[in-house]
């Protein structure tokens, strides 16, 4: 039995706490915020409930695996529950009267694409099959193991990857790969948007990001009962049942170490919590700059280009919009120009791509009768200084204009809240408000992510969106598993 301190009660930190406690360790969790969840918080306004952060749920087996770590017995929380959806996204383009529905039945989806644009069904099915094959071939090395551990490269998964390396989309950008597969520009755009899953630019991100569509089209799209907020709340229940001491409103201020190994974590109240192991789920920048100021920081890693951030409007909307589903994308007319505008000026420009998530489509209790809860996200540069009140109002006008041009109607907004990069940074500690830590706008990005085990201090581990394997719910859950494996390797 060891004393473990986990810093940060985001999804990765909570999953790490569950794993460590399930092994019998004494686990203490320090969370600066007033509740657990990190980016997976929620807020309510005029009877509408909104998930503040990520809105797509995939790989539910990772939550089920955590459930299995907690033995049956009195007081054990019930199993995590979710529903399987028959579609992932409704895609809209200006001038097209109906959305293209991305059915999770790939054959049905491919036939709809052929009817609309004349792309042969077999071409789209082949594209999805190559995404599946690339995902399955690489997951055992790039997602489920540490890239900084020599044992990874001696594993069976690594040998299988080496033997079939030639089958992977290794050359060029994601856009280049999609353009080679399809002549239809709108289908290229649809598959280009998967780069935004980790805050990257499809015109610079590597073709290997072709693995991402498999999450939706192969594994499936799901919705937790109670919304995304139920994910950290369920993990909190598991952790508490296993005896984890969770201290909210209690920021860590220093990772204490002696003779090249961790010995504890000091909190803002002046208490030092003894630790044999420390797991930092905090963003990498504050971990080094604030918690480890006396340790040599990995400046090259810290200096990497940030992922995109977002401007999010939370709108309570009167009325129903039957053409919209749970997940909706209203594409810009010139996707490449939009990303260039983000890179050069920080904003998506006058014709933004708009993502609209409406959980009340599936969970009617999330909005009053006759209303919908719109979570409206636009990709922007991770730069808090850009987003003055005037800049936000300008973007809002551009978004409303885009919605009207695409859907033929404007939402009747009855309440509004806004989340900006500076808010994301202040609420979650994510440097500059970046949603996914570093971007993946280079072929070497996976190898440049920070390792999960410190090379300087024995007993120090890292998880969360700013380190390997990356941001997003599935990768944060996998990062917690990697940390657990490293900490208990024989």
Image: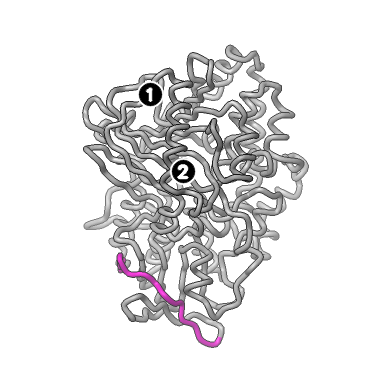
Evaluate whether residue 258 shows in this view: yes
Say which quadrant the N terminus sits in: bottom left
Residue at the far front in the pictured view: 390
Q: Position of residue 484 (x, y in %)?
A: 49, 64
Q: Which mark is residue 391?
A: 2
Check if residue 238 falls in the magenta segment: no
Local secondary structure at mark 2: helix
Give the vertical position of 67 relative to 297 (above or below): above
- Taking the spot 36% from the left edge, 76% from the top edge, the residue there is 267
Q: Position of residue 463 (x, y in %)?
A: 50, 61
Q: How many marks?
A: 2
> How did the renderer colour the structure?
one colour
Q: Which residues are magenta?
A: 245-259
Q: Position of residue 316 (x, y in %)?
A: 30, 34
Residue at the far bottom in the pictured view: 259
Give the vertical position of 32 relative to 54 (above or below): below
Which is more toward the observer, 113 or 436? Answer: 436
Local secondary structure at mark 1: loop
> Left or right: 266 with respect to 178?
left
Q: Position of residue 199 (x, y in %)?
A: 56, 46
- Taking the spot 71% from the left edge, 40% from the top edge, the residue there is 173
Characterize the local packing of mark 1: few (<14), some (14-19) or many (20 or more) Cα atoms within 10 angstroms. Answer: some
**Location of residue 457 by image quarter:** bottom right
Disc 1: which residue: 410
Say which quadrant the C terminus sits in: bottom right
Check if residue 258 falls in the magenta segment: yes
Characterize the local packing of mark 2: few (<14), some (14-19) or many (20 or more) Cα atoms within 10 angstroms. Answer: few
Closer to the chain start, of discs 1 and 2, is 2
């Amino acid at each position: 039995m060891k004393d473990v301190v986990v810093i940060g009660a985001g999804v990765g930190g909570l999953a790490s706490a569950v794993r460590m406690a399930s092994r019998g360790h004494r686990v203490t969790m320090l969370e600066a915020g007033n509740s657990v969840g990190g980016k997976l918080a929620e807020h309510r306004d005029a009877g509408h409930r909104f998930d503040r952060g990520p809105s797509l749920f995939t790989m539910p087996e990772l939550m089920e695996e955590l459930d299995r770590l907690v033995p049956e017995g009195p007081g054990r929380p019930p199993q995590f529950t979710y529903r399987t959806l028959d579609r992932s996204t409704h895609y809209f383009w200006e001038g097209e009267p109906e959305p293209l529905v991305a059915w999770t039945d790939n054959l049905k989806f491919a036939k709809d694409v052929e009817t609309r644009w004349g792309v042969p069904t077999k071409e789209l099915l082949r594209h999805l099959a190559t995404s599946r094959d690339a995902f399955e071939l690489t997951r055992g090395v790039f997602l489920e193991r540490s890239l900084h551990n020599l044992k990874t490269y001696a594993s069976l998964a690594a040998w299988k990857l080496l033997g079939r390396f030639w089958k992977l989309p290794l050359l060029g950008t994601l856009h280049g790969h999609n353009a080679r597969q399809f002549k239809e520009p709108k289908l290229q755009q649809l598959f280009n948007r998967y780069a935004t899953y980790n805050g990257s630019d499809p015109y610079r991100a590597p073709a290997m990001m072709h693995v991402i569509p498999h999450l939706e089209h192969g594994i499936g799209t799901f919705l937790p009962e109670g919304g995304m907020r139920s994910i950290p709340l369920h993990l909190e229940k598991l952790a508490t049942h296993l005896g984890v001491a969770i201290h909210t409103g209690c920021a860590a201020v220093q990772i204490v170490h002696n003779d090249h190994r961790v010995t504890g974590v000091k909190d803002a109240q002046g208490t030092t919590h003894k630790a044999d192991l420390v797991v930092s789920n905090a963003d990498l920048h504050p971990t080094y700059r604030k918690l480890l100021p006396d340790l040599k920081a990995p400046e090259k890693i810290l200096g990497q280009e940030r992922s995109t951030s977002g401007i999010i409007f939370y709108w309570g909307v009167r009325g129903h919009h039957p053409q919209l589903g749970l997940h909706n994308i209203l594409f810009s007319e010139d996707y490449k120009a939009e990303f260039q505008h983000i890179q050069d000026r920080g904003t998506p420009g006058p014709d933004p791509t708009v993502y609209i998530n409406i959980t009340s489509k599936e969970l009617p209790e999330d909005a009053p009768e006759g209303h919908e809860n719109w979570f409206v996200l636009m990709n922007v540069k991770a730069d808090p200084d850009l987003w003055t009140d005037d800049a936000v109002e300008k973007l809002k006008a551009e978004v409303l204009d885009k919605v009207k041009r695409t859907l033929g109607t404007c939402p009747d907004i009855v309440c509004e809240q806004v989340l900006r990069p500076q808010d994301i940074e202040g609420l979650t500690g994510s440097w500059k408000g970046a949603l996914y830590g570093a971007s993946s706008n280079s072929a070497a990005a996976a190898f440049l992510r920070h390792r999960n085990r410190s090379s300087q201090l024995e007993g120090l581990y890292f998880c969360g969106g700013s380190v390997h394997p990356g941001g997003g719910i599935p990768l944060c859950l996998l990062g917690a598993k990697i940390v657990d494996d490293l900490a208990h390797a024989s």
